[in-house]
Amino acid sequence: MTKKKPSETKTGAAAPAAGASRKTLLLALIVGLAAGVMTAVFLLAVPNPSGTGQVSTTGKALIGGPFTLTDATGKRVTDKDFAGKPMLVYFGFTNCPDVCPAGLQVIAAALDRLGDKAKSVTPLFITVDPERDTPELLGKYVASFHSGIVGLSGSPEDIAAVTKAYRVYAKKAPDAERPGEYNVDHSSFMYLMNANGEFVKHFPHSVDAGQLAEEVAKVL
């Protein structure tokens, strides 16, 4: 009997192992392909609520929330007192040199454009300077722009809470023209909230009155 050379024995033993390895790889590829096909079939079978063929995402801006403030008559009011109507919320202060008056003029003009529909929305002007803006003073101030605007003040703690809820920046700054006095640097957006108190949209104080009236009318 002729004995196999050592090299022939190793080659012969390696051949079945190589074949088994190829079979394992092929099986893995087949399984992976099948899994991919099943995933595609599953995704196609799930209906898309948007009907656009694209994955849709939803979310709500974290702007707004409960508040307790004081109106021009000295009455304590909360956000629940204004529930059921959309709100147009604007922050500022009576000593504001130009930005706040400009914004209030826009709101007043928008309310005039809405006509009778203006009764279905509550415009709020909330002070960021509670130390100087008493409820009575604030009430007289907003009335000079439009009778429908509601002025709200409160304690420093009240104002801190509501500015935080609406993500409003407000900080005292020394008045360069009046030593010992101060101004209040603050963000100047108008926040449109729906009848449930949920954020809809915001506008800069320089928004066109016609555009503002049109956007408010959409939520009435």
Image: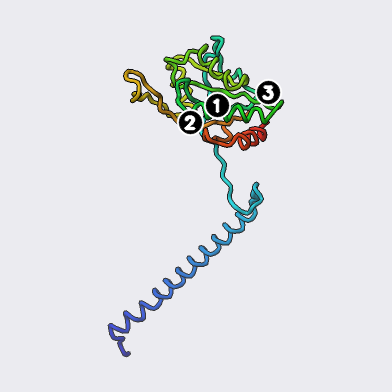
Residue at the left extreme, as displayed: 6
Percent x, y of residue 205: 52, 33
Amino acid residing under circle 3:
Lys
Viewport quadrant of the N terminus: bottom left
Q: At x 53% / y 25%, what residue is drawn?
A: 65
Would you say 123 lies left or right of 10 here?
Answer: right
Q: Does 179 sit above or below residue 46?
A: above
Percent x, y of residue 120: 68, 25
The figure's colour scheme reads rainbow
Label 3 sits on residue: 119
Secondary structure at badge 1 equals helix
Viewport quadrant of the C terminus: top right
Residue at the top extreme, as displayed: 74
Q: Considering only order in the chain, which callout, 2 or 1, is on the residue closer to the N terminus? A: 1
Label 1 sits on residue: 104
Residue at the bottom extreme, as displayed: 2
Percent x, y of residue 164: 45, 26
Q: At x 35% / y 19%, what residue is drawn?
A: 181
Label 2 sits on residue: 188
Mark 3, other Cα within 10 Å: few <14 / some 14–19 / many ≥20: few
Quadrant hosting residue 81? top right
* Discs 1/2, front: 1
Amino acid residing under circle 1:
Leu
Q: Does 105 sit above or below residue 50?
A: above
Mark 2, other Cα within 10 Å: few <14 / some 14–19 / many ≥20: some
- In the image, 112 versus 166, the foreground residue is 112
Mark 1, other Cα within 10 Å: few <14 / some 14–19 / many ≥20: many
Amino acid residing under circle 2:
Ser
Q: At x 63% / y 56%, what residue is drawn?
A: 44
Q: What is the distance, in whole Å, between disc 2 and disc 3 at their CAs?
A: 24 Å
Given contact means CB atoms under 8 Å apart, are the residues at marks 2 and 3 in contact? no
Q: At x 67% / y 35%, what residue is drawn?
A: 218
